[in-house]
Amino acid sequence: MHAARSGQGVLLALLLAAFCAPGCDTTQIPGLPNPDPTVDAQTAAGSSTDQLAGGSTGGSVSATALEQLSLERINRARLRPAQEAARYGIAIDEGIPGQLNASVRQPVALNANLNLAAREHSDDMLARNYFEHDTPEGDSPFDRMIDAGYVYVTAGENLAWRGTTGSVNEPETVEKQHEDLFVDTGIDGRGHRVTMLNGNFREVGIAVVRGFFTRNGTRYDSIMQTQDYGTSANSPTFVLGAVYDDANRNGQYDFGEGRAGVTVSLGDVSRTTNSGGGYSFAVNQSGPYTLRFPGNRTQDLNIVRGQKNIKIDLVNGNTIIINLGAGVLP
């Protein structure tokens, strides 16, 4: 827990992390469907990603500009872990010597099922005034993921809450929540950083919700954020990224820079970017693909199904950046 006083009032921050290793086998729970390796794991919840077999057009997995900002910060940490640690003045394994290193982790793609699980939990915590992984009825993060239709082989959840007795600055609060989760001050085992940098995760659901929350008798204008991470059985490879204009020329995606409604194509499947400029495709068939952006900007890819995810951004309408400069990961 972090508390401070600013010109906007008293600030308070809380964090929680939970993890389910591959030994938590959801296929042993009665009533769960067997995952079909030919079907995109996201389609059950109306996700916008496809198998890339036959042409289609649709919107990308939904995210607000704040949620896309959170995703971009998560993937910045995963693709540039050493730089992220340096940004916040810590060693990558601070607090957990030898347990984390600076190797690049694959980026995670938004998943509609996980988004649903995360949204319901953020909403519920605000509505019923609690901050826990388990609901008052005892439903765990993993129960909620299953209920939302996500059949995982490994999963984790990070929770972050920040509130002020003044008026919350939404983008600034989401940035601070990311710092809270990555630095993990005073948290034994640095569980939030460990979860964020778990290289096995391929997908994430993010819910950033604003509302009033009462803590120890004080009412706070708050941001409640749930991040639900997972990997499904027979996971496809995700091609994801953002289309944005680097308006402040600082070399990264920032709040408000994403371009919504832009058409991006991979093979003969087209997507329009979400409210934050994000897009994603699920690739279930190995082969050569061409990613096409507006302005005749293209990137050829040779994808082997199951290889690490690939983040490809279009910046300022003319610059293509792969995995924040790391290139395609081995």
Image: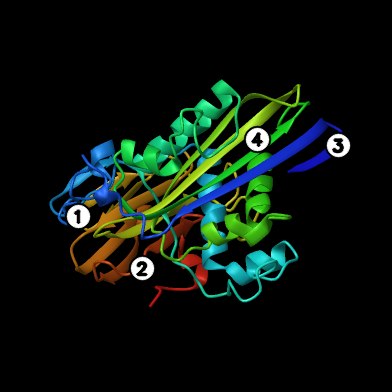
Q: Which residue is mark 3?
A: 5
Residue drawn 73% across and 43% down?
A: 1
Q: Can you give x and y, in whole percent of width and height, for residue 142 in the image?
A: 40, 44
Residue type at the position of mark 3: Arg
Alpha carbons under labels 3 and 1: distance apart: 51 Å
Q: Quadrant of the C terminus?
A: bottom left
- Viewer-side label of 3, 4: 3
Residue type at the position of mark 2: Lys
Crowd band around label 4 with a 10 angstrom C-alpha radius: few (<14), some (14–19), many (20+): some
Crowd band around label 2 with a 10 angstrom C-alpha radius: few (<14), some (14–19), many (20+): many
| Sequence-earlier tag: 2 or 4 | 4
When asked about the image quadrant of residue 45, the answer is top left
Q: Is residue 313 left or right of residue 238?
A: right
Query: Which circle marks residue 237 in the picture?
Result: none
Tell me if residue 294 comes above or below residue 114 in the rendering.
Answer: below
Q: Can you give x and y, in whole percent of width and height, for residue 109 in the image?
A: 40, 53
- Viewer-side label of 2, 1: 2
| Sequence-earlier tag: 1 or 4 | 1
Tell me if residue 81 comes above or below residue 136 in the rendering.
Answer: below
| Sequence-earlier tag: 2 or 3 | 3
| Sequence-earlier tag: 3 or 4 | 3
Residue type at the position of mark 4: Glu
Query: Which circle marks residue 308 in the picture?
Result: 2
The reply to whether the C-beta atoms of the residues labelled 2 and 3 are less than 8 Å apart is no
**Of residues 40 and 290, which is closer to you in this image?**
40
| Sequence-earlier tag: 2 or 1 | 1
Q: Which residue is mark 1?
A: 52
Q: Which residue is mark 4?
A: 170
